[in-house]
């Protein structure tokens, strides 16, 4: 029996935008707005099933960078008055030409909803299939009382009788379309040329993931909501009990650069904000250690100022970390290690929670459970301290 093709995800993202110029590539929590939708779709169905249709080369590069395939859209389908349906039809035609066939179902995602998660994408398809529907859309429950002026200019209730004020729990359920995801049967869509056709059902999506970005204010709110979600997801990866936090030095407490004067004396650049985070972490009772291969006295000097135990000049950091944990009777599973380079991979593999800075080398990132948003020497240490402390309140 032939296995049916899995659904594909199509994400329209044109270059023009009036309310918020170039919004699809604006950085949101460290990544372009478009990237969040692409990553969620890739997680849900795999990169071979995710297509971004665009008229813009910069957007195309972002899409490819984050794992999507690109369909270049004609300019006449990317104007202010162009419909999403026209872009979807063109994309489906191109996909059919490339692959020789189309899946029975597909999803239309809007990158202006960056809080959409992979679970939402899979769930709406399950809702449509479980209801044996032809199309579905994501929405959030609404309990708002709507009004509009009547012919005489008086306020008239739209979804309620203004003479009877019902409690929320007594109102019939209503839903507000959130513009994030639409699921459709491909044949029906191509026939009707509209996203709502046949039997259409509502897929309820959590309000906290339903924010839509169309203005600078929307963007600012989305950054707060997404930032909170990212922090919570990372906090959940930390050990439930943290006994120790171990730091590499170069590239973690510094930006990996070194300056040398005419006498051969070296100096490094550190972030002052790290000091407060480390101080609070130390006050919480968590053991702190800097473990470095460097023999430079600047390492010991910085650790002395921060009042952190320091072990430096270690050629085999992993062996020394095992020894220290054993001597201090600290469970490796309750230990966090923050590194950035290849020589940190052994240590990252020992502890329960391996963490790397944002600009860590790719080899180190492959061994990490958490990748921070900030680079080494520019707030990464403070970010980790805040993540541990704020999440434990």
Image: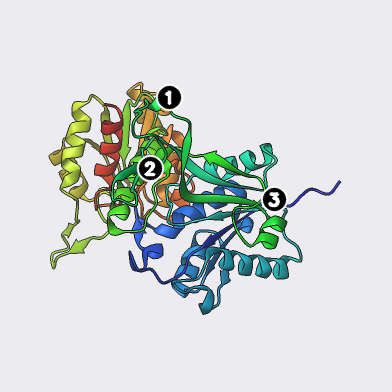
Tag 1's secondary structure? helix
Q: Quadrant of the C terminus?
A: top left
In the orientation shown, which residue stands out farthest toward the bottom?
A: 75
Q: Nearer the viewer, residue 292 or 338?
A: 338
Label 3–label 2 contact, CB within 8 A: no
State whether residue 111 is above or below residue 74. Answer: above
Q: Dot 2 corresponds to which residue?
A: 230
Q: Closest to the observer: 247 or 142?
A: 142
Please name which of the two marks, 2 or 1, marks the residue nearer to the observer: 1
Name the residue tied to disc 3. 6
Q: CA distance from mark 2 to mark 1?
A: 36 Å
In terms of sequence position, does the residue under pointer 3 or pointer 2 come before the other?
A: 3
Q: Position of residue 171 (x, y in %)?
A: 43, 29
Find disc 1 in the rendering and name its residue: 170
Mark 1 and mark 3 lie on one chain; the one further toward the N terminus is: 3
Closer-to-camera residue (189/277): 189
Q: Residue at image x 38%, y 42%?
A: 230
Could you give the CA–CA distance between mark 1 and mark 3, rounded to whole angstroms?
Answer: 41 Å
At a point 67% along the width and 49% down the height, the residue shown is 198
Give the mark toward the camera: 3 or 2: 3
- Disc 2 is placed on an element classified as helix
Number of numbered discs on residues: 3
Q: CA distance from mark 3 to mark 2?
A: 28 Å
Residue 347 shows in this picture: no
Say which quarter of the image contains residue 391. Answer: top left
């Amino acid at each position: 029996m032939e296995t049916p093709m899995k659904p594909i995800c199509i994400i329209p993202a044109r270059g023009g935008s009036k309310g918020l110029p170039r919004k699809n590539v604006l950085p949101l929590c460290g990544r372009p707005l478009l990237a969040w939708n692409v990553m969620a779709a890739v997680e849900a169905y795999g990169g071979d099933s995710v297509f971004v249709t665009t008229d813009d080369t910069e957007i195309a590069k972002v899409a490819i960078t984050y794992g999507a395939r690109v369909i270049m859209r004609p300019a006449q389908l990317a104007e202010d008055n162009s419909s999403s349906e026209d872009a979807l039809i063109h994309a489906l035609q191109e996909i059919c030409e490339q692959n020789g066939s189309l899946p029975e179902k597909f999803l239309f995602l809007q990158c202006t909803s960056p809080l959409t998660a992979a679970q939402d994408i899979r769930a709406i398809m399950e809702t449509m299939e479980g209801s044996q529907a032809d199309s579905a859309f994501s929405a959030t429950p609404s309990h708002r009382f709507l009004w509009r002026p009547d012919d005489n200019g008086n306020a008239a209730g739209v979804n309620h009788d203004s003479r009877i004020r019902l409690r929320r729990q007594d109102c019939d359920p209503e839903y507000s379309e959130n513009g994030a995801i639409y699921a459709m049967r491909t044949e029906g869509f191509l026939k009707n040329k509209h996203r709502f056709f046949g039997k259409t059902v509502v897929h309820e999506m959590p309000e906290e993931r339903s924010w839509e970005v169309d203005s600078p204010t929307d963007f600012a709110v989305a950054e707060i909501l997404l930032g909170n979600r990212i922090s919570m997801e990372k906090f959940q990866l930390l050990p439930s009990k943290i006994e120790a936090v171990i730091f590499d030095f170069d590239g973690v407490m510094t930006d990996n650069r070194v300056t040398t004067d005419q006498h051969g004396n070296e100096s490094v650049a550190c972030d002052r904000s790290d000091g407060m985070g480390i101080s609070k972490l130390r006050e919480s009772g968590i053991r702190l250690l800097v473990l470095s291969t460097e023999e430079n006295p600047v390492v010991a000097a910085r650790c002395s100022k921060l009042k952190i135990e320091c072990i430096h000049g270690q050629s085999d950091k992993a062996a020394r970390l095992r020894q220290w944990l054993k001597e201090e009777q600290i469970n490796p599973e309750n230990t966090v290690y923050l590194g950035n380079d290849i020589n940190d991979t052994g240590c990252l593999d020992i502890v329960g929670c391996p963490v790397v800075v944002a600009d860590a080398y790719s080899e180190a990132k492959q061994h990490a459970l958490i990748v921070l948003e900030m680079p080494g020497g520019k707030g990464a240490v403070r970010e980790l301290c805040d993540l541990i402390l704020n999440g434990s309140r």
